[in-house]
C-alpha cells in the first residue's frame, strides 16, 4: 500500500500530465474528485471547484479551510522539457504546475485525508481545490464562497463566522501572514491630433511624461513593516497611432499598483486622481491587501514549529476570503511560472508533515 506521501506524488504526476489552463480545468477537477472518492470521501463540485468536509463535522465548531488551486498558466517558450511529462530527476519532480501550486494542493489533500475520519477534532475541516486562481477569475474560490450549496454542505453561513484558512501557495513553508493587494489602473492622457511635420496638435505622449515621473517617484509614503511601501509600476504605454507622421491624440498608461495594508484602494485612487491631470480608471478593486494577525491560532501554531512570518509581494486567493487566511506551502515562489518548473519530492513530504503538525497544534 502506498504511503500518504507516495499517494500525493502519484496524484501530482497525474495532475501535471493533464492540461488545466485557467478556465479549462474540467479534467483536473474530475481527477481530484475521483481521487477523494476513491478513498471513501464524499465530494461536492460547483463549476471546476471540488470540496469535501471531514466525516465528523459538527455545527457550531470553528472551521479551517484548506485551499489551493489546480489551474496553471501556459508554459513559456523557454521550456526544454515536455511541460506535461512528470519526470523525477535528482529528487526534483518536473512539470507544469508542480511548484505552483500542485505540490501545495496534493499536500493539503493528503493532510485532509489523514484527518478526514479522525473523531473529536476541535474544528471542522474543509478542503477545496479551486479554479481560475492564476487569472483571478470570478469562477474560482470567489464563486464558491458565494454559493449557498457550499454554505449548506460546509455547515456555514454567508458570514463565515469563526472560519479561517490555510491557502496553499509555495512559501518554502514559511508564514505569509500579509499580502499586497493588486489594482490595475488605466490612465487616459488626451492631446490633440496634428501633423508631425508642421508642429501641429498637442502630443499626448509629451503630456504623459510628467505623469510617468510622478508615478516613478512612488508617492505613497506609508511604509508597512511586513509589506513595505505601496508600489506603482507602469507596465504598458499605448497609442492608437499606425502612422509615423500623426501627433497622437490619446496615450494610455497601464499601471500595476501593489497596495500595502495601510492604504485602501479608494485612498490610492483619490490620490492619483488629485495629482494626475488625466482620466484615472481602475479595472478592478477585488484583490485587496490582507493580513492575518500574529496572535491568530494558525500563525501561533506555525511560529511554534519554527516557521518565519513575512509579507508576500504576490497576490493569491487569500485576497478573496472574508476571513483570516494564512498563505503557506511547500515549494519556492521564485520557481513559479518559470521554464522547467519543478518541486523537490522531499518538499511535498515536508509539506504534509508541516500541515499536519500545524493542524494538530490547534
Image (cartoon, grey):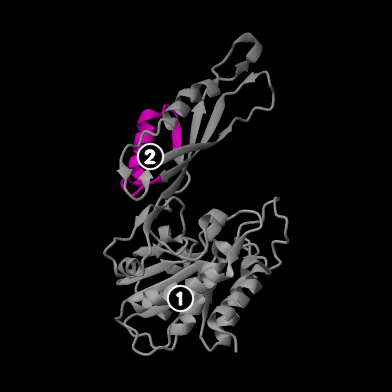
Q: Which residue is mark 2?
A: 269
For the residues marked 2 and 1, what is the alpha-carbon distance in whole angstroms? 43 Å
Residue 119 as seen in the image, left or right of residue 49: left
In the image shown, does 333 or 178 lie closer to the viewer? 333
Magenta span: 259-280
Marked residue nearer the N-terminal end (2 or 1) = 2
When the figure is inspected, residue 46 is found, relative to residue 58, above or below; the finding is above
Residue 286 on image: x %, y %: 43, 53
Kindly identify which residue carries mark 1.
Answer: 353
Examine the image and state in which quarter residue 361 appears.
bottom left
Q: Closest to the observer: 87 or 102?
A: 87
Front in this rendered view, residue 104 or 71: 104
Q: Position of residue 64 (x, y in %)?
A: 37, 74
Dots 2 and 1: beta carbons under 8 Å? no
Q: Is residue 92 in view from this perspective?
A: yes
Residue 148 visible: no
Q: Is residue 331 magenta?
A: no
Q: Residue 87: x, y in percent?
A: 69, 68
Residue at the spot x=30%, y=67% of the render? Answer: 300
Quarter location, residue 296: bottom left
Which residue does the image show at 34% across and 64% down from the upper left? 324
Amino acid at each position: 500500500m502506498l504511503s500518504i506521501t507516495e499517494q500525493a506524488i502519484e496524484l501530482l504526476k497525474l495532475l501535471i500530465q493533464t492540461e488545466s489552463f485557467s478556465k479549462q480545468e474540467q479534467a483536473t477537477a474530475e481527477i481530484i474528485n475521483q481521487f477523494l472518492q476513491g478513498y471513501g470521501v464524499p465530494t461536492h463540485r460547483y463549476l471546476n471547484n471540488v470540496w469535501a468536509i471531514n466525516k465528523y463535522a459538527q455545527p457550531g465548531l470553528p472551521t479551517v479551510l484548506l485551499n489551493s488551486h489546480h489551474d496553471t498558466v501556459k508554459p513559456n517558450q523557454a521550456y526544454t522539457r515536455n511541460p506535461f511529462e512528470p519526470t523525477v530527476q535528482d529528487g526534483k519532480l518536473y512539470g507544469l504546475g508542480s511548484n505552483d501550486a500542485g505540490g501545495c494542493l496534493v499536500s493539503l489533500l493528503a493532510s485532509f485525508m489523514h484527518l478526514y475520519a479522525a473523531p473529536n477534532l476541535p474544528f471542522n475541516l474543509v478542503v477545496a481545490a479551486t479554479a481560475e486562481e492564476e487569472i483571478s477569475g470570478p469562477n474560482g474560490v470567489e464563486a464558491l464562497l458565494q454559493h449557498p450549496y457550499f454554505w449548506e454542505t460546509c455547515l456555514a453561513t454567508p458570514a463565515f463566522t469563526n472560519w479561517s484558512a490555510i491557502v496553499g501557495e509555495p512559501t518554502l513553508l514559511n508564514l505569509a501572514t500579509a499580502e499586497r493587494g493588486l489594482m490595475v489602473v488605466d490612465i487616459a492622457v488626451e492631446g490633440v491630433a496634428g501633423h508631425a511635420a508642421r508642429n501641429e496638435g498637442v502630443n499626448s505622449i509629451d503630456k504623459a511624461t510628467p505623469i510617468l515621473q510622478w508615478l516613478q517617484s512612488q508617492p505613497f509614503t506609508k511604509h508597512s513593516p511586513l509589506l513595505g511601501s505601496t508600489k506603482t509600476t507602469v507596465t504598458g504605454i499605448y497609442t492608437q497611432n499606425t502612422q509615423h507622421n500623426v501627433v497622437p491624440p490619446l496615450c494610455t498608461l497601464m499601471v500595476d499598483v501593489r497596495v500595502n495594508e495601510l492604504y485602501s484602494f479608494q485612498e490610492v485612487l483619490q490620490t492619483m486622481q488629485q495629482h494626475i491631470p488625466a482620466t484615472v480608471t481602475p479595472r478592478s478593486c477585488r484583490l485587496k491587501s490582507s493580513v492575518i494577525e500574529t496572535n491568530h491560532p494558525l500563525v501561533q501554531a506555525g511560529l511554534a514549529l519554527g516557521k518565519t512570518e513575512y509579507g508576500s509581494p504576490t497576490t493569491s486567493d487569500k485576497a478573496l476570503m472574508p476571513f483570516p487566511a494564512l498563505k503557506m506551502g511547500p515549494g519556492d515562489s521564485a520557481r513559479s511560472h518559470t521554464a522547467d518548473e519543478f518541486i523537490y519530492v522531499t518538499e511535498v513530504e515536508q509539506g504534509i508533515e508541516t500541515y499536519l503538525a500545524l493542524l494538530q497544534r490547534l
